[in-house]
Image: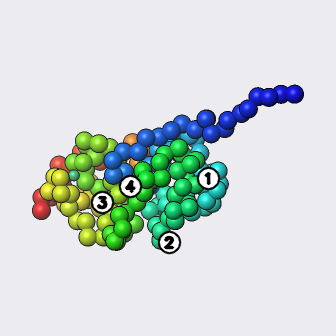
Amino acid sequence: MCNEIYNFEAWINIVEPFPGESISHFLGRFERANLLTGYQIGKEAGVGAIVTRWKKLYLNPFPTQQELEALANFVEVATEKLKEMLPVKGMTMKPRPIKLCAACYAEQPYHRIEWQYKDKLKCDRHNLRLLTKCTNCQTPFPIPADWVEGKCSHCSLRFATMAKRQKPR
Ligand SMILES: [Zn+2]
Ligand SMILES: [Zn+2]
């Protein structure tokens, strides 16, 4: 009899969340690190296609504790860490347009969930207006899950470079 135990979960490449990272950006990194689609992640985690909605920052209905625990278990990140990728209670979030503080991005290249707060129009750290489209060609930013190289999908201007055109407030 073969007693070998295959632990499939051990094959997951763990992706460490960044402080304030949005769930969309995290899921994109996890997908690429593990060569999985959002659909596959949802299936493996047992929560279904809802993961593909979270990737687009469509968080209505809001993720339940049960769903977050199931996803946390699969991606091997604490449930509390996943909750930090979602808007805090009482904050209204707008999934579109995708917003960016290019100055923040130049320091740490990832999308922050707080940029999507409805009333969030500027970055408090840099005192600069958040961008909603490319400063060169005006193309809206893609969903953060697709921010692989950190540049405009149309004209290839780097997000970090856009900081020069961010207006003070
Ligand atoms: Zn900033
Ligand atoms: Zn552009």
Mark toward the viewer: 4 or 3: 4
Mark 2 and mark 3 lie on one chain; the one further toward the N terminus is 2
Q: Which residue is mark 1?
A: 45
Q: Which residue is mark 2?
A: 61
The foreground one among 4 and 97 is 4
Q: Nearer the viewer, mark 2 or mark 3?
A: 2
Residue 156 seen by the camera:
no
Upstream in sequence: badge 4 or badge 3: 4
Question: Disc 1 to disc 4, how far (Cα)?
Answer: 19 Å
Q: Secondary structure at mark 1?
A: helix
Rendered image quadrant of residue 142: bottom left
- Identify the residue at the far left of this view: 169
Q: Amino acid at mark 2?
A: Pro
Residue 35 location in percent, x, y? 58, 41
Q: What's the distance in space between the residues labelled 2 and 4, CA to CA?
A: 17 Å
Circle 2 crowding by C-alpha within 10 Å: few under 14, some 14–19, many from 20: few
Tell me, what colour scheme is on the image?
A: rainbow
**Residue that mark 3 sits on:** 115
Q: Nearer the viewer, mark 3 or mark 1?
A: 1
Residue to which mark 4 is pinned = 84
| Cα gap from disc 2 to disc 1, whole angstroms | 18 Å
On the rendered structure, is 124 left or right of 152? left
